[in-house]
Image (cartoon, coloured by chain):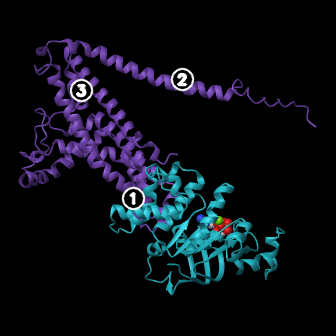
Amino acid sequence: MSSTRTTPPSPAGTGRSVRRPGDRVFAGTAKGAGILILVILAGVAAFLVVEAVPALTAPAEDIPGDRGLAGYIAPLVFGTLLAAVIALLVATPLAVAIALFIAYYAPRRMAQGLGYLVDLLAAIPSIVYGFWGIFWLAPKLVPFYEWLERRLGFIPLFAGPASTTGRTMLTAGLVLAVMILPIVSAISREVFLQVPSLHREAALALGATRWEMIRMAVLPYGRSGVIGGSMLGLGRALGETMAVAIVLSVSGGITFNLISSGNPSTIAANIALEFPESSGIDINTLIASGLALFVITLAVNMLARAIVNRRADFSGAN
Amino acid sequence: MAKRIDVSDLNIYYGNFLAVEGVNVSIEPRSITALIGPSGCGKSTFLRSINRMHEVIPGGRVEGKIVMDGQDLYGPDVDPVDVRRQIGMVFQRPNPFPTMSIYENVAAGIRLNAKKMKKSDLDDLVERSLRGANLWIEVKDRLNRPGAGLSGGQQQRLCIARAIAVEPDVLLMDEPASALDPISTLAIEDLMADLKERFTIVIVTHNMQQAARVSEQTGFFNLNGVGQPGRLIEFNPTEKIFSNPDEKATEDYISGRFG
Ligand SMILES: Nc1ncnc2c1ncn2[C@@H]1O[C@H](COP(=O)(O)OP(=O)(O)O)[C@@H](O)[C@H]1O
Ligand SMILES: [Mg+2]
């Protein structure tokens, strides 16, 4: 009928040597992309290290603040971690609750609308959050901080004196929480929706209420996804620059006092604020702090991975 | 404690689609009732309406009555959650909770009932349920391993153990062996013969030999065409269905002269 010749099927056993062009192109592209990422990462790391060396070797009195590099960076690292941890502690439960509501409680129409709304929060530029934080949120929080100082002042976190502007570490953390809320809740929502109906029905058929079904089947299944989303959020919170630079009133060093006006800055905000007026060794110092942020972010990611892998055979991925 | 189920004039819908129409049947306690019929005739739909799992699907609703030992399962003040605690279910595909160990899987239903139970009592109950599901010997040394690590047949028996651990009155099984190899299938069939001493069992099966082997009563579902509702055509003792059925359609289906 037709004169086209079909290629004979390759005999079994030689399958390894037969590579289709499509496979080869795909494998090459994937490998190339992987290598590119490593090269970029190595390039950034190398730049940070090289530029940080002068600050690492400089005598203590040449570093701004006269307390040496460690004395300069330590409060920044502390401030960065503190703000990010506050953001994470506030945002994660809220994001999980929103995701559960959208995935399992809200009527379908409403769920869609809510989903869009939350996603929209992610599209707002961080400088807008900064202005929102300083002009709207911070003044609103002042009475609350005064109340905290009066009632819970015995807890070091709320020792005060309460800031009169509201531009405190807690405010910065709350602004960051709102900023990372969309990413954490979007990822949580996706993993919650992916829980196979097989598992949900297993719980329901045992006589689980909706909430019990969520606890038995949905949350454990989505756990690693929620952690992954939180870590993405944490990454954003650690590196956030403008919002913190605008909101946080900086003066002073390491303190757990969340509601006073004497706060450590964060690495990223500090770089943004100081860089325009820096030169020489000051710039190297800022870059050294950037190196510290780089290391922190890497460490956080590795930690997240370790947590996700810890009970991998119970993950439901098999 | 096994209970009897009386179904009268049951219509089952998916939204506006009438999937099953006019089912009238009485299911005897301490026996196995098999439901057979071609694909898509509504066997699963009917089975899931018995423990009110049907309404979990958006748009799923029923008309008519299902009464279990005098209790109207669709009565106005009946909580479907309570119904499901009394009527256990085993699904076509084994579905142990992937994030739980074998032990936790079996204990899952008891934990739901929120009864505080001593660790040793719970251990006993888990062992008893696993023995009841003929799985104890295979898993007793790895109770803390994930349930998803077992073979398909073992997973299905784990699901049976999970279902019987809460001592339901009725056990529904939707093609419990269709995803399993012949040896696992026989293991499940043997198990059903034991379980019927304690439970009312309703099993959907594609496999007519299986229905003939395990059940006392058999119901034949059929439908007249695509888009038509499924109906319970005949319900009789299994022996009669397989030797001398009342309906021509049943005979055609059983002898393979179908469609
Ligand atoms: N989730 C669903 N939504 C809508 N229709 C469904 C759904 N599940 C089953 N049906 C329909 O209900 C009818 C009966 O299906 P089912 O009970 O699964 O049949 P069986 O188990 O006998 O093969 C079929 O027409 C099927 O298409
Ligand atoms: Mg079916």
List x then y, in percent, for residue A15: 71, 28
Which color has been applied to chain B in this rendered view? cyan
Q: Residue furthest front?
A: B137
* Type of the residue with mark 1: Arg
Is residue B80 something one can see in this rendering? Answer: yes
- Residue B66: x and y in percent read 56, 82
Query: Between A8 and B142, which is closer to the camera in this rendering?
Result: B142
Residue that badge 1 annotates? A215
Helix or strand or loop: what does disc 3 sit on? helix
Q: What residue type is labelled 2?
A: Gly
Q: What residue sits 87% from the left and 30% below the top? A: A5
Counting every numbered tag in the picture gives: 3
Q: Please tell me which of labels 3 and 1 falls first in the chain.
A: 1
Work out whether residue B167 or residue A282 is closer to the camera in this orientation and state it.
Answer: B167
Q: Name the residue under label 2.
A: A32
Report the chain holding disc 3.
A
Q: Tell whether A298 sits left or right of B9.
A: left
According to the image, label 3 marks what residue?
A271
Q: Which amino acid does label 3 sit on?
A: Ile
Chain letter for mark 1: A
The location of residue B184, given as percent across then percent down, is: 63, 57
How crowded is the residue under tag 3: few (<14 C-alpha within 10 Å), some, or many (20+)?
many
Q: The purple chain is which one?
A: A
